Amino acid sequence: MAVSQTVRNPDCVAASPAKVQKVHWVSPLYNARKTIRRRAPSQAPHDLPDALHPILRRVYLARNLTQGAQLETSLSGLLPPHGMPGLDAAVALLEDALMHNQRIVVVADFDADGATACVVALRALRSMGAQQVAYVIPNRIIHGYGLTPAIVDVAAAFSPDLLVTVDNGISSVEGVAAAQARGMRVLITDHHLPGLRLPAAEAIVNPNCPGNTFPSQSLAGVGVIFYVMIALRARLRASGWFSPTRPIPNLAALLDLVALGTVADMVPLDHNNRILVTQGLAHIRKGIACPGITALLKIAGRTPEQASSTDMGFFVGPRLNAAGRLENMALGVECLLADTFPEAQKCAARLHALNRERRSIEAEMQAQAFDDLARLGLEGSPDLPWGLVLYDETWHLGVVGILASRIKDRFNRPVIAFAPGSSGELRGSARSIPGVHARNTIETIAIRYPEVIRHFGGHAMAAGLTLHQSQLATFSAAFDAEVRNALTEDDLCGVILSDGELEPSDLTLEVAELIRTGGPWGQGFPEPIFDGVFQCLNSSRVGESHTRLRVSVADAAPLDAFVFNSTPDLPSPGSHLHLAYRLDVNQFRGHQSPQLIVEHILPEG
């Protein structure tokens, strides 16, 4: 593995390929640099209902939710499409395609957001009378990300009149030109941040484009295409397109897919996104979700009738993403397109197996990365770069994003992990921390060093890029320098924000259920974390890398507390531990009980 040192020593240092004894993955369990900080009580005026439980009231106020109207999550509160840039041009393209029975090809991204957006587009267009709709999804290793000239060649096999991108395309200048040279029109729907130059597509719908007046810029790719389909249905209704033989479709039936893609892509859950997710989860709980989501929940051991945003983000999303990481996301799309449960079940079983394989690959890559950092003397060293760039020629391209996220969590600094691409290229995934905008930082380097980066794109907390291997050292030094300009040493000390202490009488199933249903929780609207001192009654290992604690406090009944991806060291019985935790519902063989999901442990004092 190659690791950038610091800006003072920009040469990458290659670790010896010889294997050494593995260093266990260390979770936040004993990361001494992390601290627990309680959120300051909000003094903002509010009109939240008097009947609201005091715990939820303090949690909502800490998240700047101060108006009772913000608790309203019915579809009537959804923002109308007006003001979304490019929407009129997009609808005109699609209306023309339907009226003239043109061939449409949807070009999707290879993650869960892209897959759900693809299925929303396909189901909605077909329900509105489109007869010739197909889809293509790039293979991340062969075609790269987005609407590249290579994926245009694949789409050309369908002889499309119109290409519709979902969750990609805003940076596809060359791909749009290649499609138009073949006589295709292009509609881009995306939510990623645009670059300095927009592609010359016939229409672009992206709430993050310049000139946007749409009140929410936090839509995921699936949310953007859902809005496009809503606007298209309105246009077709006004034109008299629908009839008794072609009824007006109920697009709300697609909200389960919108909820899944929104949560899995970790976009901020502003009020509009919370409406979309809440309504989608309601469909799943009522048993009217698409068979694919139901099958993925069941194979993950989750109960559809009690589905939560956590289930979407940590159980369904990863299994769907496994297809795009290790094989082809077409498997995920087919799972979500399945019309019967047995058909979906077969796809879900394959996705489940791929996810297990992905976790195995990820574990090996993590162990290797920490081994090499320890060998180089960088773990815990002041010489560890502030902007950490890692590369190994054996790493799997589909898993480096997860690897970067894990290392970011461990060292609390921006991380970019690279894997080999083709023709000497390296492809990297960046994961960042508050204070460093991942995409904008990469763009700054691209402007200052135009010969270094070939392609890039993304968001504040996650981004991707491609460069030639010969430019790795230059990029590593530049990235570390940019991060140092943005952060202070205190920023490198991780902080876990707590919503305070719960009374022993609140550590109940009723309160755990209250919190679970008080969401949906997610990016920008985080699930509550509480903290307090507990006595450890006993501890044991669960699986290969998890810990189960039995803890107690005051007069409350003993609780199970789970620490995932934890160090093999176990707390001693009788010891007192300061826990930062989420109060959760444990579902086991039809029985429910409260449990703690531990985010961090500090010895008492």
Image: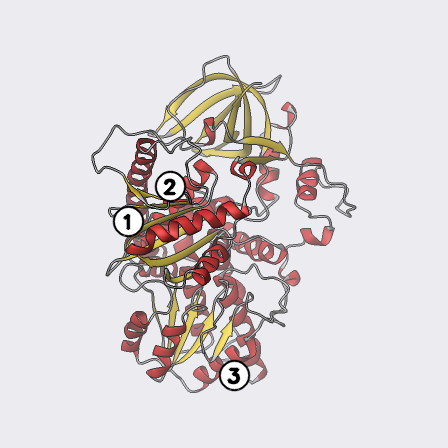
**Relative to residue 78, is residue 107 drawn left or right?**
left
Label 3 and label 1: CA atoms lie apart by 48 Å
- Residue under the image location 40 percent in, 84 percent down: 101
> Mark 1: which secondary structure?
loop
Q: In the picture, which quadrant includes the C terminus?
A: top right
> Mark 3: which secondary structure?
loop
Label drawn at residue 241? 3
Residues 378 and 247: in front is 378
Q: Amino acid at mark 2?
A: Gln
Disc nearest the viewer among 3 and 1: 1
Residues 284 and 530: in front is 530
Label 2 and label 1: CA atoms lie apart by 23 Å
Q: Residues within 10 Å of mark 1 (few under 14, many from 20)?
A: many
Disc nearest the viewer among 2 and 3: 2
Read off the residue under disc 1: 396
Instruction: Tell which circle, 3 or 1, labels the residue nearer the N-terminal end.
Output: 3
Instruction: Tell which circle, 2 or 3, labels the residue nearer the N-terminal end.
Output: 2
- Compared to 147, does 111 lie above or below? above
Pointer 2 with pointer 1, Cβ within 8 A? no
x, y percent for residue 496 = 56, 35
> Mark 2: which secondary structure?
loop
x, y percent for residue 538 = 45, 17
What is the residue that sits farthest to the top in this orientation?
574
- Residue under the image location 22 percent in, 33 percent down: 19
Q: Residues within 10 Å of mark 3 (few under 14, many from 20)?
A: some
Read off the residue under disc 2: 5
- Compared to 182, does 79 lie above or below? above
Residues 2 and 406: in front is 2
Residue 247, visible in the rendered structure: yes
